[in-house]
Amino acid sequence: MSDERMRQENDPADRRTVARLVAAWLAETERHDPEAAGQARDGWERGALSERAAQDLATWVTARVTDTGFTEDEGPYVAGAVRITPSDKDTVHAWLRARGHAV
């Protein structure tokens, strides 16, 4: 097992971050593409996202970063259903990579 995967498996904060963001991603996907959401949910529950679902999740979390760390003067606030930091995005990407997905 890779060092990155071991860290991801053993870090409860990382697991909570991934679970929180996957739940938000699945809910949003359900509204736009119920079939894809169902397939992704099945993969998530089995512990093995398909490559398509993994890429969709990686793209989604990148596009949905809401907590940019900028002040109002430095940049716009990005509204979103969940708070997603750049670190959260990195955590999800690392989690996907640890499972063999090219992110």
Image (cartoon, rainbow, N blue to C red):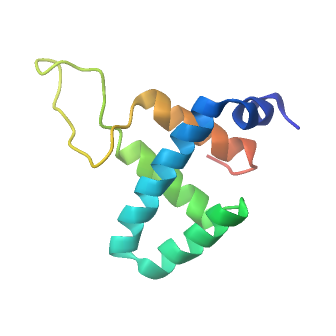
Q: Looking at the rendering, which quadrant does residue 53 occupy? A: bottom right
Residue furthest bottom in the image: 35
Is residue 80 shown left or right of residue 86? left
Residue furthest right in the image: 1
Q: Residue 42 location, x and y as percent? A: 63, 72
Looking at the image, is 44 positioned above or below residue 77?
below
Q: Looking at the rendering, which quadrant does residue 68 occupy? A: top left
Q: Residue 54 location, x and y as percent? A: 60, 57
Is residue 100 shown left or right of residue 50? right
Q: Is residue 8 visible?
A: yes
At horizontal 46% and vertical 51% (from top left) the residue drawn is 59
Looking at the rendered image, the quarter that the N terminus falls into is top right
Asked whether 6 or 16 is in front, the reply is 16
At horizontal 18% and vertical 33% (from top left) the residue drawn is 77
Looking at the image, is 12 positioned above or below residue 92?
above
Looking at the image, is 95 positioned above or below residue 48?
above
Number of numbered callouts drawn: 0
Q: Residue 11 location, x and y as percent? A: 68, 29
Q: Residue 101 location, x and y as percent? A: 69, 51
Q: Is residue 50 visible?
A: no
